Image (spheres, rainbow, N blue to C red):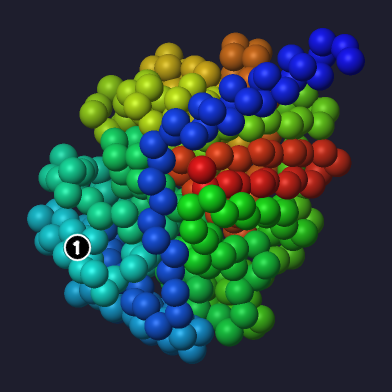
């Protein structure tokens, strides 16, 4: 026998031992009959859209779950549902409530960052919290500081149809999974080119009208593996240099030398702002020891002076030598795959399609 198989076997043994040493903690699986809490930790829902909350609650109830709609979800003033202390109190009450087994905010917003210094992270229970956009400003710090896995996925109001599209619906499989489980996700067949809240959800909330194609900056197939971290760049970039964005401490304390996979999206930034933000994350060390970066589709990224968001990603790839994937199923151009912060994942992208194997270890 040649030395190569022995070397490879030794590598696999070492990698497996490292993963056994990780400290990521996964909440208990969600079960039928249990309660889902809905609290507006960022923006609330204006009165003319309250029917979206009721429709989404009905869809969970018909699937066998109880729903608690917090007081915060019904109000919105100056881009927040309520003053920060009220938002914090409702969130922590749901976290501490033994009857609430998962928390899904209605949607994102702008100023979730206000409540981050007020949270007692030592007092957080292991409970699934799901969302994207500004909700990622909460999810990422929770995982970085505590090692508790969180879910970058759908928002509550996007679950108001009788049927959930195959990509979005994976969030429920995630919430029902236990430590040690593996979930395999495939990229979408089509995506939604524009939001149409006034259209009836038939058969899905999202109107999937354009073919999906995951792309790579290199133009070649890529494979990488590591621990998932995810977020909306517009908001999580403001965690740099704060106690809520300490990537190095997370690496040292919770993931035992595993590399990271970043899944990121651009909501509103033009191409130059997008590039400046990527440089900020790079200069802060967020991309150190990273196996791959996945960027979501975006309706933003507007070019300025001939400089495009593709230019930004190409420069980042040249600067870091990290494989970069874009136009992926994450963010404000749905549908989006479900990314569990802290989970170990293997990602393959080839011929416009992607597979992600995510394991709760």
Q: Is residue 313 visible?
A: no
Give residue 334's position: percent from left, percent from top. Answer: 60, 58
Tell me if residue 209 comes above or below residue 15 in the rendering: below
Q: Residue furthest right?
A: 1
Q: Nearer the viewer, residue 77 or 134?
A: 134
Q: Residue at x 18, y 43 (%)?
A: 122
Tell me if residue 312 comes above or below residue 27 in the rendering: above
Packing grade of label 1 (10 A; few <14, some 14-19, many >=20) is: some
Q: Could you say whether the residue bearing mark 1 is in a helix, strand or loop?
A: helix
Q: Residue furthest left?
A: 85
Left-right relation of 359 to 38: right
Residue 354 sits in quarter = top right
Give residue 125's position: percent from left, percent from top. Answer: 25, 55
How many numbered tags mark residues here? 1
Q: Residue at x 44, y 31 (%)?
A: 21
Residue 72 sits in quarter = bottom left
Q: Residue furthest front?
A: 1
Tell me if residue 265 comes above or below residue 152 in the rendering: above
Give residue 146's position: percent from left, percent from top. Answer: 29, 40
Q: Residue at x 50, y 73 (%)?
A: 159
Q: Is residue 325 visible?
A: yes
Q: Residue at x 42, y 57 (%)?
A: 131
**Residue designated by label 1:** 96
Q: Nearer the viewer, residue 164 or 252?
A: 252
Give residue 61's position: percent from left, percent from top. Answer: 43, 86
Tell me if residue 140 comes above or below residue 291 in the rendering: below
Quadrant containing the N terminus is top right
């Amino acid at each position: 026998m040649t030395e190569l198989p022995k070397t490879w076997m030794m590598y696999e043994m070492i990698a497996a031992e490292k993963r056994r040493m990780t400290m990521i903690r996964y909440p208990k699986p969600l079960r039928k009959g249990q309660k889902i809490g809905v609290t507006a930790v960022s923006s609330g829902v204006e009165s003319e859209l309250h029917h979206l909350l009721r429709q989404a609650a009905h869809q969970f109830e018909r699937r066998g779950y109880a729903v608690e709609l917090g007081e915060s979800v019904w109000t919105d003033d100056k881009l927040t549902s309520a003053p920060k202390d009220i938002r914090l109190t409702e969130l922590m009450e749901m976290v501490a409530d033994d009857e609430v087994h998962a928390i899904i905010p209605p949607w994102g917003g702008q100023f979730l960052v206000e409540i981050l210094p007020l949270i007692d992270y030592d007092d957080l229970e292991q409970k699934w919290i799901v969302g994207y956009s500004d909700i990622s400003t909460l999810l990422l710090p929770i995982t970085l500081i505590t090692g508790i896995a969180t879910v970058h996925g759908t928002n509550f109001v996007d679950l108001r149809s009788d049927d959930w599209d195959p990509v979005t619906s994976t969030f429920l499989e995630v919430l029902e999974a236990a430590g040690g489980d593996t979930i395999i996700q495939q990229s979408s067949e089509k995506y939604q080119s524009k939001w149409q809240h006034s259209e009836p959800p038939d058969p899905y909330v999202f109107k999937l009208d354009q073919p999906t194609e995951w792309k790579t900056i290199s133009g070649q197939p890529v494979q990488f593996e590591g621990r998932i971290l995810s977020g909306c760049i517009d908001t999580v970039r403001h965690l740099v240099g704060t106690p809520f964005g300490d990537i190095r401490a997370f690496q040292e304390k919770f993931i035992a030398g595993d590399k990271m996979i970043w899944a990121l999206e651009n909501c509103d930034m033009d191409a130059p702002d997008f590039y400046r933000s990527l440089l900020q994350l790079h200069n802060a060390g967020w991309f150190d020891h990273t196996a791959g970066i996945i960027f979501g589709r975006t309706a933003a990224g507007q070019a300025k002076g001939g400089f495009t968001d593709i230019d930004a990603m190409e420069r980042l790839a040249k600067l870091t030598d990290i494989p970069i994937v874009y136009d992926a199923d994450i963010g404000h151009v749905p549908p989006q795959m479900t990314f569990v912060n802290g989970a170990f994942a293997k990602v393959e992208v080839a011929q416009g399609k992607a597979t992600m194997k995510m394991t709760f270890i």
